Image (cartoon, coloured by chain):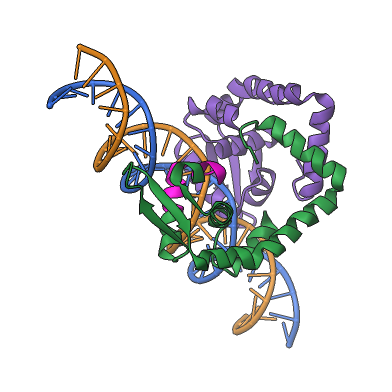
Chain colours: A purple, B green, C blue, D orange
Amino acid sequence: MAPIREMLSETGITEQQWRVLRVLAEHGSLDTSTLADRASLLFPSLTRIATTLRNKGLITQTRDEIDRRRQLIEITEAGQKIIDDRADQAAQIVAGFRAALGDDNYESLLDLLAQLDPGSSN
Amino acid sequence: MAPIREMLSETGITEQQWRVLRVLAEHGSLDTSTLADRASLLFPSLTRIATTLRNKGLITQTRDEIDRRRQLIEITEAGQKIIDDRADQAAQIVAGFRAALGDDNYESLLDLLAQLDPGSSN
DNA sequence: TCACAATTATTAACATGTTAAGGAAATCAT
DNA sequence: ATGATTTCCTTAACATGTTAATAATTGTGA
């Protein structure tokens, strides 16, 4: 993940914050549970990350009026911009990994890791 | 690592503390730099871990009298006992992973991971 | 020898992982 | 309808990863 963190260092955003924003960028707005699941974060972590992202103005949190235990988290324009500006760069980093291993090996690695951790739907 | 952590939960020792003890159990006593390297820990982490292990009476730290910047870290009998008592159990957990993937796949996984991170001599 | 650099380790500050405890809202059984 | 349970989330407490700043010691060159 070092190259990813390096890319993000200039934004003042961490790897996990970036992951949260990416998931939100794909899905628009999500409830906390789904978001935690897709970003592979535990609840307590997400709570803190959401707080800092909210303070940075990159997301908004609103109570679900139907079930007021729930929160809806939405990415702001500023947050979306951060993702958009670096999507290509991130894709290239991943492509770099893939190239380093070769396509076949890359697929093998993903398969083997998936076998070890059936939980991660990624 | 979940099974490892579960095994360790009864000892009150964490995964990293266990790693430090394991390295020490193999090598007797080591200077901090070498220990950090072999346990794949950064200096600040090792400093803290050493403090807690020392407080638990599992290691001892002594200044190197020739170069007084350095410290020698040694495992105590109590620390050695913790490792000895669980070495078999840990080996079985690893064997379990290996069995889950199959021997060939297991080797493949190690190879692929090594290609991604040439640094880890493990 | 003495200022300056390099080495070794610690401390600080922040973010996260992890487990446990707590709090508010909804659900359910009676 | 109400008390117990469940669900969803937050807080708390501790350990670690990570980067930067400091401290202590040693090494070096003029």
Q: Position of residue A50 (x, y in %)?
A: 53, 44
Q: Please say if B6 is above or below A104.
A: below
Considering the whole magenta stretch, tell me its main secondary structure. Answer: helix
Residue ID at (45%, 40%)? A55
Residue ID at (55%, 38%)? A17
Q: Position of residue C24 (x, y in %)?
A: 52, 64
Q: In which quarter of the image is the C terminus of chain B?
A: top right
Q: Is residue A77 magenta?
A: no
Q: Position of residue B45 (x, y in %)?
A: 46, 47
Q: Does the magenta stretch include residue B40?
A: yes
Q: Where is residue B53 in the image (x, y as percent from the top left)?
A: 46, 60
**What range is drawn magenta here?**
B36-49
Question: With A69 as the anchor, is B72 left or right in this view?
Answer: left
Residue ID at (31%, 44%)? B68
Question: With A118 as the anchor, is A1 left or right in this view?
Answer: left
Q: Please say if A53 is above or below C19.
A: above
